[in-house]
Amino acid sequence: MTAYAVISDVHANLEALHAVLAKIEKDNVDRILFLGDSVGYGPDPNECTEEPKDRAAIFIAGNHDWAAVGKNDSTSFNIHAKIAIDWTGEVLTAENREYIAGLPLTAELEEDDIFLVHGSPYEPQKWHYLYSEYDVVDNFSYFKEKICFVGHSHVPFIAEYSGRGPVSFHDNITKIKTDCRYIVNTGSIGQPRDGNPDAAYVILRDGRIEIKRTSYDIVLTQNKMKKAGLPSYLAERLSRGR
Ligand code: ZN
């Protein structure tokens, strides 16, 4: 099987993205899969669109990506997210805007039985959040592949389902079982919300799924956000991972 790194929710945080890409380099994977939200919240939306565009084999759309280019409604965003997305819309280059507007909502990798979506397999265009068994269980009916990778909630998990009984959740590592299917939330690179400020990503190789974390220079990102005039709440939450 091909070895993959699966990444999501960079949110214009270039320091976190670079830290993860450096780790991925050492993990020696064959392909990088990116689940979207390159922009929104952070200070480097252009670089954080261009690097995944050059380095990822697949790049699908996130809700902030499409909101930044006016393809998605941002009226449901909270005030901090809205201010950041309006700023992002102003600084994105014409080329990056065009690229983001053309991103697909989902992707399938038939050869390795993998499905990719930013929010949820059920109604991808509505950006539902997956956190718990309550949110996850019905979603197994809305994709046919063995493993589905999602992002969006910024809270990583590995959900394993045999088709009956409860869904089991693994915190950071599991061996893939032949009689189970999986929904894996990779967590977020640029704005983790599980109480751990380290950037999160996933490695899939040799029949194993592993959620990995890496620290990065949060203060540098926070200083860039201040300089750009982005909401201080968005900078401050990076330290807390919330
Ligand atoms: Zn996000």
Image (cartoon, rainbow, N blue to C red):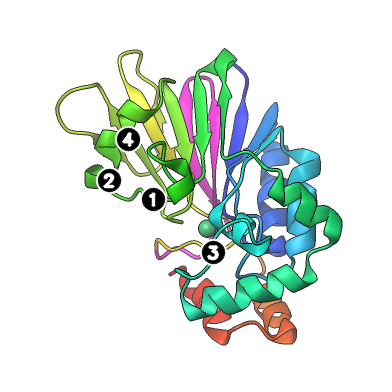
Question: Residue at position x 47%, y 68% from top?
Answer: 241
- Secondary structure of the residue carrying tag 2 is helix
Tag in front: 3 or 4: 4
Q: Are marks 1 and 3 in contact (CB under 8 Å)?
A: no
**Residue 56 visible to the viewer:** yes
- Mark positioned earlier in the residue sequence (1 or 3): 1
Q: Which mark is residue 128?
A: 1
Crowd rating for badge 2 (residues with CA inside 10 Å; few <14, some 14–19, many 20+): few
- Mark positioned earlier in the residue sequence (4 or 1): 1
- Secondary structure of the residue carrying tag 1 is loop
Q: Amino acid at mark 4?
A: Asn
- Secondary structure of the residue carrying tag 3 is loop
- Secondary structure of the residue carrying tag 4 is helix
In the rendering, at what x and y percent does residue 66 appear?
A: 62, 55
Q: Write down the residue under mark 4.
A: 139
Q: CA distance from mark 2 to mark 4?
A: 8 Å
Q: Up-down: is 166 above or below 42?
A: above
Reply yes or no: does residue 215 show up in magenta. no
Side of 137 relative to 31 (left or right): left
Q: CA distance from mark 4 to mark 1?
A: 10 Å
Q: Write down the residue under mark 3.
A: 191
In the rendering, at what x and y percent does residue 34 appear?
A: 63, 42
Q: Up-down: is 227 above or below 113?
A: below
Q: Write down the residue under mark 2.
A: 135
Q: CA distance from mark 1 to mark 3?
A: 18 Å
Q: Is mark 3 within 8 Å of ligand 1?
A: yes
Q: Amino acid at mark 1?
A: His
Q: Where are the magenta residues, as a range?
A: 195-214
Q: Are marks 2 and 4 in contact (CB under 8 Å)?
A: yes
